[in-house]
Image (tube, rainbow, N blue to C red):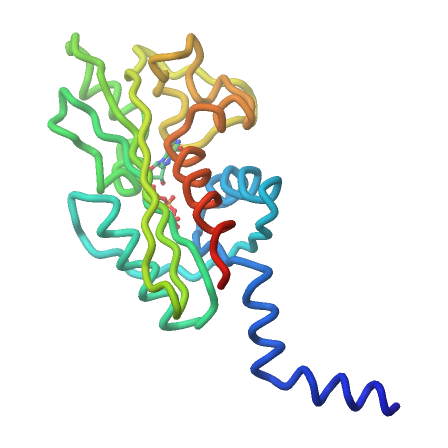
Amino acid sequence: MKNAKNTYEHYDNDDVDFQVRNKIILFVTGNFHKFEEVRSILNPMGIAVGMLRMKEKEIQSDHTSEIAENSAKEAYNRCHLPLIVEDAGLFIDALEGFPGPYSAYAYKTIKNKGILKLMENTQNRKATFHATIAYYNQKTGPQLFEDKIEGEITLTERKNNNTGFGFDPIFQPTQSEKTFAEMTLQEKNSLSHRAKAANKFAQWYNKQTI
Ligand code: ITT
């Protein structure tokens, strides 16, 4: 009993809070695919990550970095735990960067078929996926990690069963013969915008003494 009491005395609320805080990062997202992709990068690098569905209203901006930074601050102000958010977008050259920051809306409304329709007579199929991961905790404030992957919009949707999400069936990275939706999670993670940003984040995080 004495030991138990000592234990409680030792780990007062602040200590417990501190210890838990430094073991788990929350990924604030409503998208389970994104969570799975990021978790499969971070876990092997010793970073445990939990998914928190707490959708904030996103600001409008042309840059995924501004959206991610703002969302991270807003989410931190609500839950006061170390967290990441990620904002991604598909920027299509021939459509002047559309859907870019409007990717979620475009996917919900016109979907892949609508994008292919817009590109019907277009020779220039170049497109880039951008991702920004924003980390936030009280000590570091916002920290941003960005990357991108170039490729092209395919002529038709191509996918394997149960792999990929969103624009994956119409995006083929330059280095590959497959669309993202024809790849395994590991294959997508070896190339993707999100995986590269997650790697940058993990390398930075593992050097911190927070
Ligand atoms: P959050 O809750 O994390 O915001 P979301 O699905 O709204 O989830 P984003 O705003 O980052 O995510 O991305 C906008 C859309 O872009 C997303 O819904 C997908 O349709 C598409 N997208 C993003 N990353 C993608 C990827 O790796 N592969 C295919 N489509 C992707």
User: Quick check: 131 above or below 122?
Assistant: below
Q: Position of residue 131 (x, y in %)?
A: 33, 38
**Residue located at (32% from left, 49% from top):** 144
Q: Quadrant of the N terminus?
A: bottom right
Q: Viewer-proximal residue, 38 or 147? A: 147
Residue 128 relative to residue 180: left or right: left
Q: For the image shown, how many numbered marks are present on the structure? A: 0
User: Quick check: 111 above or below 102?
Assistant: above
User: Quick check: 100 above or below 25?
Assistant: above
Q: Position of residue 203 (x, y in %)?
A: 47, 43
Q: Viewer-proximal residue, 209 or 160? A: 209
Q: Residue furthest left?
A: 96
**Residue located at (35% from left, 20% from top):** 171
Q: Position of residue 111 (x, y in %)?
A: 31, 31
**Residue located at (33% from left, 13% from top):** 174
Ligand 1 quadrant assignment: top left
User: Quick check: 120 above or below 163?
Assistant: above
**Residue located at (26% from left, 56% from top):** 58
Dividing the picture into quadrants, the one containing residue 115 is top left
Residue 30 relative to residue 73: left or right: right
Q: Position of residue 47 (x, y in %)?
A: 57, 50
Dividing the picture into quadrants, the one containing residue 84 is bottom left
Residue 104 relative to residue 63: left or right: right
